[in-house]
Image (spheres, rainbow, N blue to C red):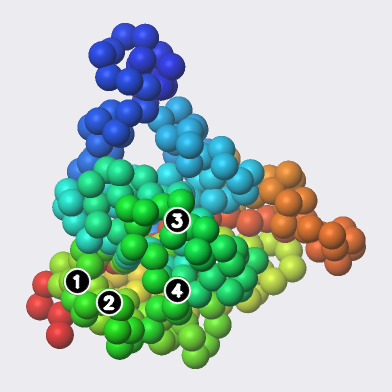
Amino acid sequence: MGMNCVAHAATSSESCCSKEFILKRYRGNFAVPPISYGTVRDYCDSCDYLPGLSTAQNDLKDLQRPWTLKAALGLTPPGGSLLEIGAGEPFVAALLSDLGYNVTVVDPYDGSGRGPTAFKHFVRKYPKVRIVKAELRDGLIDLQPGNFDGIYSISVLEHITEPSLGAMFQAIKSFLRPGGWSFHAMDCVIEGTDAGYHRQQCFNIANYLDQLAGGEVVTHQNVEHIIQQAIQDIDTFYLSAAGHNLWRGGLPYEKFPFRKVISIQFLVRRPQDHS
């Protein structure tokens, strides 16, 4: 994979993990399949070159945030318009803004999914990011239909149930530009409490994304295959014991025992002739 930031800084005029270095490494140069799972290889790459995103939380977001940034750089045009759904504190949106993108965040900031509520604080802290305090829905007057080159989310989809899930994907269809990308990293419990719910949630999300892409891009069979592949792969990135303890909060362990949780990553493109 090459030198990490420290080694690169010692041998190059570019500053360690500078914006120029990040763009050179990932712009147009990060392959993203329609469905994948997070790996230790990708996480280590992020620790080497995107340490600000990969060491912030001690949970799956340390893998998912840099993956999302790489996907945005690899897929969307320089200076494009991006929309993040449910960002919480907008770490990825802020870095993408620094890298020249026009980024909008839509988040209700109501604490759902254990998310933050500090809307006014984030507006002040991240002036380059446009932050809209709302749930993403079709007809949201703050957004222009067909305006975004990419719409993404990080550890959000697993928390959204019907009918809100279907409404959210209808909004994605409305606001995504023809030829634009919809990409999402979500937590998926593959063994332990709620594994059945998470598997079904992955199936539901695959259905909506397949409809957005025009069919036969991500299917139930693709989801099941990728889960089984992750179970067999020694390189699969799992939520750590420390991360589990973080999310356990004050609950007794007996009420929140350890689960095997991975990151499932989806990617589809809206067809150019999509109506």
- Residue type beneath disc 2: Leu
Q: Residue placed at 24% from the left, 73% from the top?
A: 176
Q: Can you identify the residue that label 4 sits on? A: 133
Q: Secondary structure at mark 4?
A: strand
| Place of residue 129 in the rendered image (x, y in percent of width and height, measured from the top left) | 35, 57
Q: Residue placed at 45% from the left, 28% from the top?
A: 48
| Place of residue 133 in the rendered image (x, y in percent of width and height, measured from the top left) | 45, 73
Disc number for residue 143: 2
Q: Can you identify the residue that label 1 sits on? A: 147
The front one of 219 and 55 is 55
The front one of 169 and 271 is 169
Quadrant including the C terminus:
bottom left
Q: Is residue 135 shown left or right of residue 57?
A: left
Residue 185 visible in image: no
State how far apart marks 3 and 2 are (Cα).
Answer: 21 Å
Q: Nearer the viewer, mark 4 or mark 1?
A: 4
Q: Can you identify the residue that label 3 sits on? A: 124
- Residue type beneath disc 3: Arg
Q: Residue placed at 25% from the left, 82% from the top?
A: 174
State how far apart marks 4 and 2 are (Cα).
Answer: 12 Å
- Are discs 2 and 1 less than 8 Å apart at CB? yes
| Place of residue 98 in the rendered image (x, y in percent of width and height, measured from the top left) | 30, 44
Q: Secondary structure at mark 3?
A: helix
Quadrant including the N terminus:
top left
- Are discs 3 and 1 less than 8 Å apart at CB? no
- Residue type beneath disc 1: Asn
